[in-house]
Amino acid sequence: MSVLSRRRWIAVAPALLLAALPFASSSQAQETKPKPIRVLLLTGFDVRSHPWKQTSPLVREILEKDGLCQVFICEDLGILESSSLAKYDVIVLNYGFWKEPEPSEKAKRALLEFVKNGKGLVALHFACSAFQDWPEYQQLLGRVWKKGIGGHGPMSNFEVKIADPEHPIAKGVSNFRITDELYARLSGDAPIHVIAEAYSDWSQATEPLVFSHQYGKGRVVQNVLGHTLEARRNPAYQKLLVQSVQWVARR
């Protein structure tokens, strides 16, 4: 190569390198983009006043909004017995009421092992009332609604206070108002970490509304808000929901 050619190459090479950088950065960004959190949303049974056929699609819409999650809605608890359970990172329970059929013993074991082995569980609203004859469910959730003990006053507009603003689930969420049911007197003695709470006129006490709990190696979050579609459309509720799923999935 002549001296002139070398000089031309030296002059052009930096420009070629700079031109290639955007493509390299774009390619690298695509390679490092995290995979969506795979969520199994279990639903299909609840009291008449809980419109699960509408709230479940709304939960999916909230979680899939920014490509964060890929949500599969299932109305059959039998999926817990399936080998396909292993492909999910998080189970969301939008399922409740004590009159529902009990899952099989195999399904119960599978749900417990799913969380014990390090995967995540998020229980919504009346999921705290499910499976009343299954003692280990109380240990799994940390707090449950027991017939004759748990309750709430009339639907009302109340302030939800963020008890731990430093927790990742509460990031960017300030105290907020919501028109909803305020669940009270949930039962259980397992240690829980309260993230959001509100004072109940019905129980005359401050009640945990969003809280986390460790079960084996897995993380569990309960959010007992969300009686209506309107309540679940509350921006603060949605942010808490999304960040709960992220947190239990360790993202």
Image (cartoon, rainbow, N blue to C red):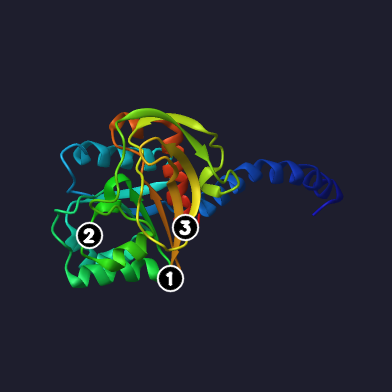
Q: Quadrant of the N terminus?
A: bottom right
Which residue is more in the foreground, 79 or 166?
Answer: 166
The dot on residue 179 is none
* Tag 2: amino acid: Gln
**3 or 1: tag closer to the N-terminus:** 3
**1 or 2: tag closer to the N-terminus:** 2
Is 26 situated left or right of 96 in this image?
A: right
Residue at 47% over, 46% down: 243
Q: Which residue is mark 2?
A: 132
Q: Nearer the viewer, mark 1 or mark 2?
A: 2
The x, y position of residue 217, in whole percent, is 45, 69
Disc 2 secondary structure class: loop
Tell which residue pokes out farthest to the right in this image.
Answer: 3
Q: Is residue 93 above or below residue 65?
A: below
Which residue is more in the foreground, 116 or 210?
Answer: 210
The x, y position of residue 38, in whole percent, is 36, 54
The x, y position of residue 145, in whole percent, is 29, 52
The dot on residue 216 is 1
The x, y position of residue 182, in whole percent, is 36, 38
Disc 3 secondary structure class: loop
Q: Which residue is mark 3?
A: 192
Q: Within 10 Å of the Cα at label 3, are there few (<14), some (14-19), or many (20+) other Cα atoms?
A: some
Gap in angstroms between the C-alphas marked 3 and 1: 14 Å
Which residue is more in the foreground, 230 or 118?
Answer: 230
Gap in angstroms between the C-alphas marked 1 and 2: 21 Å
Disc 1 secondary structure class: loop
